[in-house]
Amino acid sequence: PEVVKSICEAASKWGFFQIINHDVPIEVLENVKDATYKFFGLPAEVKNKYSKEHSSSNNVRFGTSFTPQAEKALEWKDYLSLFYVSEEEASALWPLACREQVLDYMRKSEVVIKQLLKMLMKGLNVNEIDETKESLLMGSMRTNLNYYPKCPNPELTVGVGRHSDVSTLTILLQDEIGGLFVRENNGDNWIHVPPIKGSLVINVGDALQIMSNGKYRSVEHRVVANGYNNRISVPIFVNPRPTDMIGPLPELIKDGEKPIYKQVLYSDYVKHFFRKGHDGKKTIEFAEL
């Protein structure tokens, strides 16, 4: 009960917390970190097979920065984005250098994700997560492998600009280098998230802020560029399905609580996010009433 309470409190006050003793085996986490380095160590022409121009599927994407066509300055980051559809598709399309390790990481994390969602729903007095609700909260998943090469002029750029995620929850594995900062919800303080060996960093995304009618808050975060070390991180984005309508959960508004968000099609929300550069928490305005 204490853990449930502190998780719900962290999700409403900070939108952000770290967990240890989470039951995802440490070697699974280490394997996925090694696989990330392995993928980004591949020759450019091999990685480019997965770029927007060459990838055989929208679900596998190698790229740089966030939305290059909309940004004034590029972010100092390369990434491989893997949208999970099925084991068959992953086996056929995901790069061999990291396929098994990412699938293993996703499989082993599922128990934790379900447990966290159960606790967070309990905090909203939603005690029953049926199939429909489970699919709304975690109907689709994407894993990114992020690589932040060391930067000759770190003061001139960022690793990732300030933004909140569009997910329900993000489960982030970071290495020991550090560089992730979270914005205090009611102020301008940026707080460094110290890497804790074996931990997973959990943050609330916009979809959960909308579904919880603002009780849980997505958090603005950014990554600074580093002049000394390469850094990697591996987030799993736990999302509604693109075809889902998201809005405040019916259980929350049935007793007369006023909805502060409208129902929006999740894929429209995501498109809006990707149409522009990173701009803090502006995306959420898209769903406000």
Image: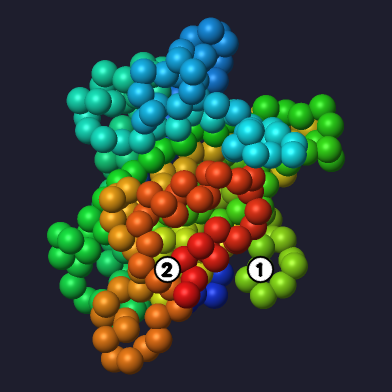
Provide residue 57's location: percent of width, then percent of height: 35, 24
SS at mark 1 in the image: loop
217 or 52: nearer the eye?
52
Residue 144 higher or lower than 212, as above or below: above
Provide residue 217's location: percent of width, then percent of height: 50, 69
SS at mark 2 in the image: helix
Q: Name the side, left or right, on which 82 lies relative to 272.
A: left
Q: Name the side, left or right, on which 88 lies relative to 46.
A: left
Picture quadrant of residue 175 = top right
Query: Counting residues from the N terminus, which is met first, the one under dot 2 or under dot 1?
Result: 1
Residue 33 higher or lower than 94, as above or below: below
Provide residue 251's location: percent of width, then percent of height: 26, 80
Q: How is the image coloured?
A: rainbow
Amino acid residing under circle 2: Ile
Residue with the mark numbered 1: 184
Amino acid residing under circle 1: Glu
Residue with the mark numbered 2: 210
Q: Residue at horizontal 47%, vertical 61%?
A: 206
